[in-house]
Image (cartoon, grey):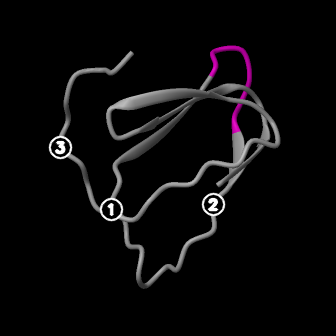
Amino acid sequence: MIVLRGLGTVRLGEQSYDIAPYDAVYVAPHTAHQFRAAADEPLGFLCMVDRVRDKAVPVPSRPEVT
């Protein structure tokens, strides 16, 4: 995934990382992930996936990771 605008964080599994424009984020197959925008502006990114192979899979809710 490539961040185009805004600031935020990405959660990959149990870890969180800050993200900014032009950062590239690799999400390994079957890795739970979540992108969150900072409070002051929208977050825009490109996500390139194979829509057949990489169908979304719900992840059970769990407490926030900070």
Q: Amino acid at mark 3?
A: Pro
Q: Amino acid at mark 2?
A: Cys
Q: Quadrant of the N terminus?
A: bottom right
Q: Which residue is mark 3?
A: 60
Along the line of sight, the residue nearer the viewer: 13 or 37: 13
Real-space CA distance between mark 1 and mark 2, rounded to the nearest whole angstrom: 15 Å
Along the line of sight, the residue nearer the viewer: 55 or 66: 66
Real-space CA distance between mark 3 and mark 1, rounded to the nearest whole angstrom: 14 Å
Neighbourhood count class around disc 1 (C-alpha, 10 Å): few under 14, some 14–19, many 20 upward: few
Give the x, y percent position of residue 5. 80, 37
Is residue 65 placed above or below 3 in the rendered structure?
above
Residue extending furthest bottom?
Answer: 52
Is residue 21 placed above or below 32 in the rendered structure?
above
Please give the label number shown on residue 47.
2
Please identify the quarter of the rendering in which residue 36 is found: top right
Q: Quadrant of the C terminus?
A: top left
Give the x, y percent position of residue 32. 34, 48
Real-space CA distance between mark 2 and mark 3, rounded to the nearest whole angstrom: 22 Å
Q: Which residue is mark 1?
A: 30
**Closer to the N terminus: mark 1 or mark 2?**
1
Please identify the quarter of the rendering in which residue 8 is found: top right
Q: Are marks 3 and 1 in contact (CB under 8 Å)?
A: no
Please give the label number shown on residue 49.
none
- Of labels 3 and 1, the one closer to you: 1
**Closer to the N terminus: mark 3 or mark 1?**
1
**Closer to the N terminus: mark 2 or mark 3?**
2
- Of labels 1 and 2, the one closer to you: 1
> Is residue 48 left or right of 61 when viewed as pictured?
right
Q: Give the magenta range.
A: 38-43
Q: Are marks 2 and 3 in contact (CB under 8 Å)?
A: no
